[in-house]
Image: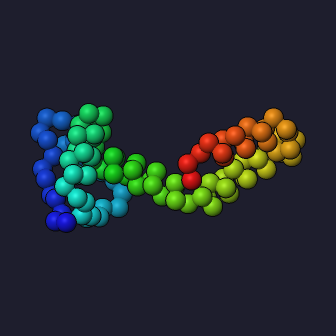
């Protein structure tokens, strides 16, 4: 997979300049690159924003321990009453059953 270095479209939001944060070079298949480019243009978002959002979502989906910790922390902050409420427990069970892991 050869790395694609393509100029940003002139006259679009995609040429708005420097994006703060870590810069890195990655190689992606041509078909993924083209789909991401079309998506970014359609949404009016920068390429960096699209790739960052996709990677953020991918990491979140593959780090269930972090999700569990966040849920536990939120429930602890709300107190024991909410954590043991039958309606909340039933709703949580439904969400967990219907979620893709």
Q: Quadrant of residue 40?
A: top left
* Residue placed most toward the observer, 73 or 84: 84
- In the image: residue 33, left or right of residue 67: left
Q: Position of residue 63 (x, y in %)?
A: 55, 60
- The colour mode here is rainbow
Q: Position of residue 19 (x, y in %)?
A: 30, 51
Tell me which residue sits at (60%, 58%) in the image. 64
Which part of the image, by quadrant, shows the N terminus?
bottom left
Asked if one can make out residue 16 in the rendered structure from this viewpoint, the answer is no
Asked if one can make out residue 63 in the rendered structure from this viewpoint, the answer is yes
Tell me which residue sits at (30%, 34%) in the image. 43
Q: Position of residue 12 (x, y in %)?
A: 18, 35
Considering every residue shown, the one lying at the far front of the view is 97
Tell me: residue 4, above or below residue 10. below
Tell me which residue sits at (16%, 65%) in the image. 2
* Residue placed most toward the observer, 8 or 39: 39
- How many marks the image carries: the answer is 0
């Amino acid at each position: 997979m050869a790395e694609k270095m393509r100029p940003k479209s002139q006259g679009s939001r995609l040429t708005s300049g420097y994006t703060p944060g870590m810069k890195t070079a990655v190689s992606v298949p041509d078909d993924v690159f083209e789909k991401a480019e079309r998506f970014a243009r359609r949404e009016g978002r920068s390429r960096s924003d699209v790739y960052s959002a996709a990677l953020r979502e991918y990491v979140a989906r593959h780090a269930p321990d972090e999700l569990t910790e966040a849920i536990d922390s939120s429930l602890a902050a709300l107190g024991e009453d909410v954590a043991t409420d039958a309606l909340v427990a039933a709703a949580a069970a439904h969400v967990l059953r219907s979620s893709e892991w």
